[in-house]
Amino acid sequence: MALETGPLLLLALSLGLASAQKTLEGVPVQPGFDAHKVEGRWLTIRLAASQARLVSPTDPLRLALHSIETRDRDLELVLFWRGESVCRRVSVTIHPTGQPGQYQGSFEGGGSMLVHFVSTDYRSLILHVHFEDDGGEVTSLWALLARRMPGDPEWLGQYLEYVREFRLQEAPVFNLDAQCPPPEA
């Protein structure tokens, strides 16, 4: 997997999104969503995708959501991509679409994403990410995120309902606790 395009695909899979088998209109968003309340550290509890084959559990490279930061009205998804002798911070800025709880962005290597904050109490979060590459291939993911492990069982139940409804496949979950170490002198 090329270092330049890999983070885009792995980001989609590490965040979790809805299936391409259903339309985006069927994806709910959090009423009264407050972007500033999702700011901070998040852990991925569960992940499901329309194309689970895209991430192998034996792949030595791992991309994991670390946190969400606010930048005025925009949000920045902070991820870390780690593997053997590789550690890189990857930041993806997403912009409000004008619909509450819905953001869009694009990648350096091409492609776009639409992010739905489906449901949250700001301690747990169900996130849907719809990725489309330059060739028109769509990958949808759903992620259950929490501020700490193991997460709330009620949120897990709600998340699993979406997995069934959108006919998703479970995908490997990776959480990276530490940021990249400083370069050796």
Image (cartoon, grey):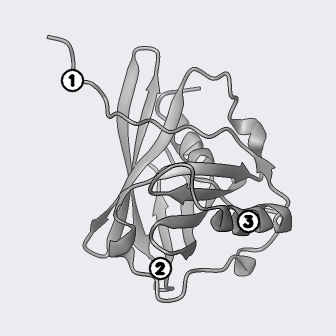
Tell me which numbered mark, 2 or 3, is placed earlier along the sequence: 2
Q: Quadrant of the C terminus?
A: top left
Q: Residue at x 56, y 37 (%)?
A: 174
Tell me which numbered mark, 2 or 1, is placed earlier along the sequence: 2
Image coordinates of residue 136 in percent, x first then y, are: 70, 55
Q: Secondary structure at mark 1?
A: loop
Graded by Cα atoms within 10 Å as few (under 14), some (14 to 19) or many (20 or more), the crowding at tag 3 reads few
Q: Which residue is mark 2?
A: 97
Q: Nearer the viewer, residue 77 or 97?
A: 77
Graded by Cα atoms within 10 Å as few (under 14), some (14 to 19) or many (20 or more), the crowding at tag 1 reads few
Question: Disc 2 versus disc 3: distance between alpha carbons?
Answer: 29 Å
Q: Which residue is mark 1?
A: 182
Tell me which numbered mark, 1 or 3, is placed earlier along the sequence: 3
Task: Report the amino acid beneath label 3.
Answer: Gly
Q: Nearer the viewer, residue 168 or 152?
A: 152
Q: Nearer the viewer, residue 173 or 55?
A: 173
Asked whether the residues under the numbered discs 2 and 1 touch, taking CB atoms below 8 Å apart as contact, a structural biologist would say: no
Image coordinates of residue 89 in percent, x first then y, are: 34, 38
Question: Disc 1 versus disc 3: distance between alpha carbons?
Answer: 40 Å
Q: Secondary structure at mark 3?
A: helix
